[in-house]
Image (cartoon, helix red, strand yellow):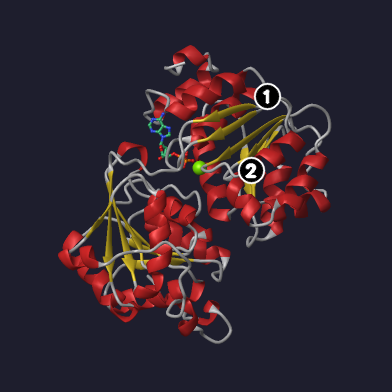
């Protein structure tokens, strides 16, 4: 189905789609919405930035009866930020339907969320731990859920949430429709699907390769201690309206955010050592353009969609090549242009070699001297990363006003 009209969605949902300015479904939406509307279980894989949220949100909204007061759909996400983002998108899409979407996630008081749930939720979007807390405290009743979504399923598996997912799905009584969305499809997701899904339709749009048409990828060979200067030079030259800089460790991210702040950048950090209110505040600042650089760890930023991220920097090379694709997938989203730069120290040559081997799209040398370096795929020795930046007692002690 190549148009939204052909999908015969509830006109009130269509109104939301139009308001958001979406005129044509993306390939993953085109292929998954039809089967989901028919009640099929679906496994959907498409690279980051391909519109998976809408692919499950429209059929979900269609399945929910706003006249009932029960929780009828649940979306599970690996991170708090992603849960918030999905809930926001779903509220916009369902703005005219009367469907109430409530986000529940850790790091916020249970009380406020309990009150939200008590006032009536048709759809719950949450992280697994907090969903279970509410079930156990009887503030959330999942028995009448009929639509279940696992978003970023590969990350949820990586983070060890499988037992949580088991528990949550066990709370649902009666027939339920299940869909799993993911950027990559490791075998373990297929194993998961056998357990929870009935004759699922598998839809793979393509691998998690970045959109080569609109993304330019570069690398530079830079000594670890010279990376900060190299980054500020790059930011001076490119002047991106917004950029995400990735670090492997929480302390590394914290340290770099402070260094950039000292140099006068409007920068915010995002990593697991921050309190939830800090994370919310910093993400807001980045989304609204009050901060133009986000320094993030991988887990904290999975699935995050900030439109107009013009530039991604791999300040540290990720050990897992799949993480490389997830990182650069934060830019060049939905057909926009983007650039990705990787700073590769000698110690990281082996890891970068493996990334080069896995990418079909070219990753080009930034400068003539970068061409001279050869990368042999292998495991690298990580001596220079975040470890040196160990700060006693974790990142939380750093002054609250440091990043503005
Ligand atoms: P994914 O979950 O696949 O990484 P998202 O669902 O976060 O991708 O969507 C990426 C971006 O594409 C979002 O900014 C979203 O608003 C936009 N988008 C989604 N569907 C459409 C569409 N049909 N037309 C245009 N833009 C879309
Ligand atoms: Mg997504």
Residue 120 can be seen in this image: no
Determine whether the residue tagged by mark 2 lies in a helix, strand or loop: helix
The percent coordinates of residue 76 (x first, y second) are 65, 44
> How would you rate the neighbour count of disc 1 (Cα within 10 Å): few for under 14, some for 14-19, many for 20 or more?
some
Q: Is residue 255 above or below residue 341?
A: below
Q: Is residue 258 above or below residue 63?
A: below
The percent coordinates of residue 382 (x first, y second) are 47, 75
- Residue at the spot of label 1: 65
Residue 320 can be seen in this image: yes
The percent coordinates of residue 24 (x first, y second) are 38, 23
The percent coordinates of residue 44 (x first, y second) are 56, 33
- Residue at the spot of label 2: 187
Direction from residue 234 to residue 35 in the image, left or right: right
> How would you rate the neighbour count of disc 2 (Cα within 10 Å): few for under 14, some for 14-19, many for 20 or more?
few
Q: Nearer the viewer, residue 267 or 346?
A: 346
Residue at the image position 34 percent from the left and 64 percent from the top: 375
């Amino acid at each position: 189905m190549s148009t939204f009209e052909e999908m015969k969605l509830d006109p009130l949902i269509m109104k939301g789609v139009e308001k958001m300015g979406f005129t044509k479904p993306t390939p993953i939406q085109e292929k998954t919405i039809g089967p989901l509307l028919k009640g099929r279980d679906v496994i959907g894989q498409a690279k980051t930035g391909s519109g998976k949220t809408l692919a499950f949100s429209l059929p979900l909204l269609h399945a929910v009866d706003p006249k009932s007061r029960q929780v009828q759909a649940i979306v599970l996400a690996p991170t708090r930020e992603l849960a918030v983002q999905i809930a926001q998108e779903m509220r916009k899409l369902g703005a005219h339907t009367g469907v109430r979407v409530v986000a529940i996630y850790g790091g916020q008081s249970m009380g406020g969320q309990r009150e939200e749930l008590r006032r009536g939720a048709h759809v719950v979007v949450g992280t697994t731990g907090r969903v279970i807390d509410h079930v156990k405290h009887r503030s959330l009743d999942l028995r009448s859920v009929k639509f279940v979504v696992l978003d970023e399923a590969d990350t949820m598996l990586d983070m060890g949430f499988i037992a949580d997912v088991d528990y949550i799905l066990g709370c649902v009584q009666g027939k339920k429709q299940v869909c799993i969305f993911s950027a990559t499809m490791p075998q373990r997701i297929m194993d998961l699907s056998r357990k929870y899904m009935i004759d699922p339709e598998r839809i793979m749009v393509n691998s998690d390769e970045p959109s080569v048409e609109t993304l330019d990828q570069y690398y530079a060979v830079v000594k670890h201690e010279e990376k900060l200067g190299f980054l500020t030079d790059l930011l001076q030259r490119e002047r991106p309206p917004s950029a995400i800089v990735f670090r492997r460790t929480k302390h590394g991210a914290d340290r770099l955010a402070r260094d950039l702040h000292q140099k006068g950048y409007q920068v915010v950090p995002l990593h697991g050592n921050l309190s939830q209110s800090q994370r919310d505040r910093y993400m807001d600042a980045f989304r609204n353009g009050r901060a133009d650089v986000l320094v993030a760890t991988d887990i904290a930023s999975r699935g995050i969609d900030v439109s107009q991220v013009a530039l991604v920097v791999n300040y540290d090379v990720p050990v897992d090549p799949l993480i490389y694709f997830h990182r650069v997938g934060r830019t060049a989203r939905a057909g926009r242009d983007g650039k990705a730069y990787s700073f590769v120290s000698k110690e990281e040559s082996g890891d970068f070699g493996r990334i080069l081997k896995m990418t079909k799209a070219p990753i080009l040398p930034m400068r003539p001297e970068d061409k001279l370096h050869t990368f042999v795929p292998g495991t690298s020795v990580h001596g220079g990363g975040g470890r040196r930046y160990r700060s006693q007692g974790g990142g939380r002690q750093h002054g609250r006003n440091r990043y503005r």
